[in-house]
Image (tube, rainbow, N blue to C red):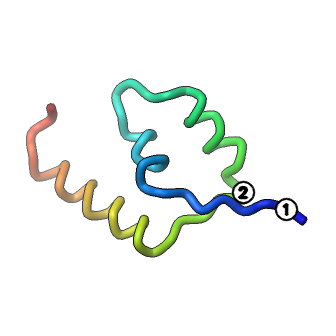
Amino acid sequence: MQSIYLLDINIISELTKPVQNQTVVQKIFETQKTSVLSSITWGEALFGLKKNKASPVR
């Protein structure tokens, strides 16, 4: 039986950081075929992207 990973926003947001944790990034790419997002996480990601577009870069 194959494992499926439910990713949370703290994992997904790692991909948007200027300095990324390479261990997390590598794991995301290694498990991309068996990883899923909940509709809540998807909504959080869209909200964060929209919010960051409206505010200046830190």
What amino acid type is highlighted by mark number 1?
Answer: Gln
Mark 2 and mark 1 lie on one chain; the one further toward the N terminus is 1
Q: Please name the residue shown 15% across and 31% down the image.
A: 58
- Is residue 26 depicted above or below 32 in this figure? above
Query: Left or right: where does residue 52 sit relative to residue 26?
Result: left
Query: Residue 2: horizontal and vertical position, in percent?
Result: 85, 62
Query: Residue 23: horizontal and vertical position, in percent?
Result: 60, 29
Q: Which residue is mark 1?
A: 2
Q: Which residue is mark 2?
A: 33
Query: Left or right: where does residue 19 sit relative to residue 54?
Result: right
Query: Residue 11: horizontal and vertical position, in percent?
Result: 48, 47
Rounded to the nearest whole Å, what is the CA distance between mark 2 and mark 1? Answer: 11 Å
Q: From the image, state whether disc 2 or disc 1 is nearer to you.
A: 1
Q: Please name the residue shown 43% across and 40% down the image.
A: 14
Q: Which image quadrant: the N terminus?
A: bottom right
Q: Residues within 10 Å of mark 2 (few under 14, many from 20)?
A: few
- Is residue 49 depicted above or below 16 in this figure? below
- Toward the viewer: 39 or 50? 39
Q: Please name the residue shown 27% across and 54% down the image.
A: 49
Residue 57's label in the rendered image is none
What amino acid type is highlighted by mark number 2?
Answer: Lys
Q: Please name the residue shown 35% across and 59% down the image.
A: 45
> Could you say whether the residue bearing mark 2 is in a helix, strand or loop?
helix
Query: Left or right: where does residue 3 sit relative to residue 52?
Result: right
> Could you say whether the residue bearing mark 1 is in a helix, strand or loop?
loop
Q: Residues within 10 Å of mark 1 (few under 14, many from 20)?
A: few
Query: Left or right: where does residue 21 sit relative to residue 16?
Result: right
Q: Residue furthest bottom?
A: 39
